[in-house]
């Protein structure tokens, strides 16, 4: 097989540079995918900058991949050459632990992220274990579905796992790549939806995506005004927030679920949690089973990412724009 060409980070915060690697013989359980599109998730930015202290350079970022299968290993039975597939945060898992056996591969201790310790999707091709190459429903356009492979599943799973339903009052905090998809799924679940944003120019679009209400979190006292209002709050923000204000915004038995990764620890008073039986939770992406389900729901309910397309070679421009919070709402690289 020939070399794989992409764009790699060589040091924390550095510009991505052209990079190639030799993938070797295809493994028996792998598929090789020719990449058409790859979303730029804020987690790629955290990895490029080594915010989490886990980046190993050089590496090619990218874990919101859509493309077509161009080769399969000798034991692959679930995927075929020519099939269009999506690949998200995870590219492999052990397959035999308690969590893998019950369909929770994303909780496997040996879960292999797509672009941590290996090369991801800002490239022309990629290899992954076939279980993590998910068929994409025909009605979904590749450019708009790529961001669902990480951003979409990360907001879909907690809404589903925390039992959001038509009686629920849901708030989505941060209307970026994840948040703008979160509004659409929360609407699909039938909830009353509120968008929390620092960008007042996002109000009209947030409402068109499913928000019934819009809270500009830059307004003084904005969170106090909504105290005791929500059953479920989903934070997609990568910055420190007024976490106590959000816990106070929960109704009794409400949950604040964090999927965005702020730099500092989340410090909270105990009594508002104890008294109102409130909870704080976290949620990762999701399993292959969850990805299948999420894509099916997206296809049936018309959930899709609003994208800004960049040529693959312009990945540095896309990353810079994500850092400035200027993308509406997900940058997608196209080959
Ligand atoms: P994004 O597109 O940059 O969106 C983040 C949004 O947060 C921004 O659009 C902005 O929304 C808001 N925001 C940014 N800076 C802020 C600040 N200083 N104060 C308040 N709000 C701010 O990022 P993303 O791709 O959606 O990712 C968001 C976070 O989720 C990242 O930390 C990423 O690593 C994490 N993530 C986690 C998982 C997981 O498995 N749990 C998966 C994917 C991503 P407004 O303009 O509306 O304020
Ligand atoms: Zn991601």
Image: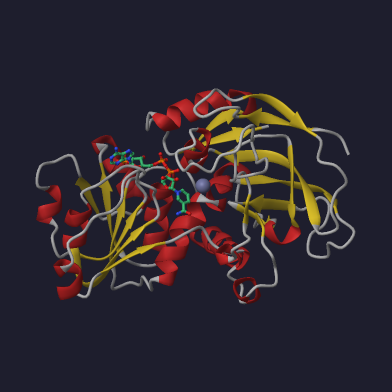
In the image, residue 215 sits, relative to residue 109, either above or below, namely above
Quarter of the image containing the C terminus? top right
Give the left or right position of residue 127, taking residue 41 as reference. Answer: right
Vertical arrangement, residue 107 with respect to residue 222, above or below: below
Please indicate whether residue 267 sits to the left or right of residue 7 in the image: left
Which sits in the foreground, 212 or 311? Answer: 311
Residue drawn 64% across the image and 57% down it: 137
Ligand 1 quadrant assignment = top left
- Image x and y of residue 16, in percent: 59, 25
Frontmost residue, 166 versus 278:
278
How many discs mark residues in the rendered view? 0
**Residue at image location 70% in from the left, 52% down from the top:** 85
Name the image colouring.
secondary structure
Q: Position of residue 209 (x, y in %)?
A: 37, 50
Location of residue 252 (image quadrant): bottom left
Q: Quadrant of the N terminus?
A: top right
Can you see residue 303? no
Q: Tell me: residue 159, above or below residue 20.
A: below
The reply to whether residue 325 is visible in this rendering is yes
Q: Position of residue 230 (x, y in %)?
A: 22, 64
Question: Is 126 on the left-hand or right-hand side of 100?
Answer: right
Give 24 or 314, whichever is nearer the viewer: 24
Relative image position of residue 217 (x, y in whole percent): 20, 44
């Amino acid at each position: 097989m020939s070399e794989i060409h992409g764009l790699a980070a060589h040091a924390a915060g550095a510009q991505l540079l052209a990079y190639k690697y030799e993938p070797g013989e295809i493994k028996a359980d792998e598929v090789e995918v020719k990449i058409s599109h790859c979303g730029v998730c804020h987690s790629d930015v955290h990895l490029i900058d080594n915010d989490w202290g886990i980046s190993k350079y050089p590496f090619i970022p990218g874990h919101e991949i859509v493309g077509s299968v161009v080769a399969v290993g000798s034991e692959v039975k679930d995927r075929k050459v020519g099939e269009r597939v999506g690949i998200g945060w995870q590219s492999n898992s052990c397959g035999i632990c308690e969590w893998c056996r019950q369909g929770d591969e994303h909780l496997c201790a040996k879960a292999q992220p797509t672009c941590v310790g290996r090369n991801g999707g800002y490239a022309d091709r990629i290899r992954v274990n076939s279980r993590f190459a998910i068929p994409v429903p025909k009605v979904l356009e590749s450019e708009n579905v790529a961001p669902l492979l990480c951003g979409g599943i990360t907001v879909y799973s907690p809404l589903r796992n925390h039992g959001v339903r038509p009686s629920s009052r849901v708030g989505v905090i941060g209307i970026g790549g994840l948040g703008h998809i979160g509004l659409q799924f929360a609407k699909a679940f039938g909830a009353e939806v509120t968008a929390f944003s620092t960008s007042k120019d996002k109000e009209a679009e947030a409402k068109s995506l499913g928000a019934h209400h819009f809270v500009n979190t830059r307004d003084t006292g904005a969170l106090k005004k909504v105290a005791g209002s929500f059953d479920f709050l989903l934070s997609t923000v990568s910055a420190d927030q007024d976490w106590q204000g959000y816990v106070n915004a929960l109704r009794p038995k409400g949950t604040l679920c964090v999927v965005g990764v702020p730099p500092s620890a989340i410090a909270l008073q105990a009594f508002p949690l104890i008294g109102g039986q409130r909870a704080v939770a976290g949620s990762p992406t999701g399993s292959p089973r969850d990805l299948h389900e999420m894509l099916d729901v997206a296809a049936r309910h018309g959930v899709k990412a609003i994208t800004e397309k960049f040529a693959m070679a312009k990945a540095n421009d896309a990353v810079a724009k994500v850092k400035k919070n200027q993308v509406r709402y997900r940058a997608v690289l196209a080959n």
